[in-house]
Image (cartoon, helix red, strand yellow):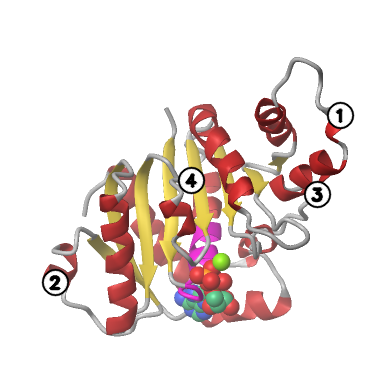
Amino acid sequence: MGYSIAIAGKGGTGKTTLAALIIRLLKERKGGSVLGIDADPNNNLAEFLGVKVKESISGILDRVAAQPDKIPAGMTKDRFLEYQVQTIIQEDEGFDLLTMGRPEGAGCYCYVNNVLRNVMSGLIKDYDFVVIDNEAGLEHFSRKTTGSTTALVVISDSTAAGLRAAERISELVEELKIKTKNKFLIINRGDEEIDKEKINNRGLKYIGRIPEDPQLTDISINNNSVFSLKKDTASLAAMAGLLGKIITGGI
Ligand SMILES: Nc1ncnc2c1ncn2[C@@H]1O[C@H](COP(=O)(O)OP(=O)(O)O)[C@@H](O)[C@H]1O
Ligand SMILES: [Mg+2]
């Protein structure tokens, strides 16, 4: 059974950035196979990883919807979609990537969510590490797409509003009885120390901060990937320390 890390938090808190840093670090640890899942319809995890997305789950859905006769006789549509998802996992050096994408046309992407949920448990078994970059809203959690995760990592800024949002995610995960072994909180771009006790009482284990890092701004402006960061870059080095805590489950 693989170790799954689901990243959550408000928009702009740094979920995709930190997910990409984690994937890079897991790759370099050589501790087993790694799958990144971009579960945000406004996907950009691939960009942060320097991968060009060839096909997404939404793409498959659009294709199958346009040509329903392609579904083999005796196979349900769901089963067919699940099989197709396996075929679009992109293999890169040291990690694989699956992109959810955004369905074309109007309509909700709950169906994409459902497909993702159906394949998730299988994927978690197939890989040693699965890192899921979730969207800003809580739709995934409310539809239980994330299923059971080994570690939920909530990203927040250090503002009171940010911390309240983090707390709500933690509470929602409890309410929905989504199985998580640990719920961690990371403060991103926070300069000041926060009251650890207060946070830990919210069901989240505060494991530390990632500093404001101008190198991250650089890569995002120049469209570079996290692989262009030097090993001793402040954010990457800080994430390495926090990843150790995430994997060992403690502080
Ligand atoms: N620690 C940091 N230091 C500097 N810039 C950061 C840091 N974390 C994130 N950013 C920048 O903030 C922006 C939003 O980050 P992103 O990871 O896309 O957030 P989210 O996925 O939560 O919406 C990006 O331009 C990213 O480069
Ligand atoms: Mg994002």
Q: Nearer the viewer, mark 2 or mark 1?
A: 1
Disc ID at residue 145? 4
- Specify whether tag 1 is near ligand 2 (CB below 8 Å): no
Give the quadrant of the N terminus: top left
User: Tag 2: residue type?
Assistant: Lys
Q: Is residue 18 magenta?
A: yes
Image coords of residue 50 (percent x, y):
71, 59
Whether residue 105 is visible: yes
Q: Which residue is mark 1?
A: 70
Q: Is residue 2 left or right of residue 182?
A: right
Disc 4 to disc 2: CB gap under 8 Å = no
Q: Nearer the viewer, mark 1 or mark 4?
A: 1
Q: Which residue is mark 2?
A: 198
Is residue 154 positioned above or below 248 on the image? Answer: below
- Specify whether tag 2 is near ligand 1 (CB below 8 Å): no
User: Tag 3: residue type?
Assistant: Lys
Say whether disc 3 or disc 2 marks the residue closer to the N-terminus. 3
CA distance separating discs 1 and 4: 26 Å
Residue at x 35% of width, y 80% of height: 190
User: Residue lying furthest top in this view?
Assistant: 74
Q: Nearer the viewer, mark 3 or mark 4?
A: 4
CA distance separating discs 4 and 2: 29 Å
Mark 1 surroundings: few (<14), some (14-19) or many (≥20) residues within 10 A: few
CA distance separating discs 3 and 1: 20 Å
Disc ID at residue 54? 3
- Specify whether tag 4 is near ligand 2 (CB below 8 Å): no
Q: Is residue 75 magenta?
A: no
Range drawn in magenta: 11-21
User: Tag 1: residue type?
Assistant: Lys
Disc ID at residue 78? none
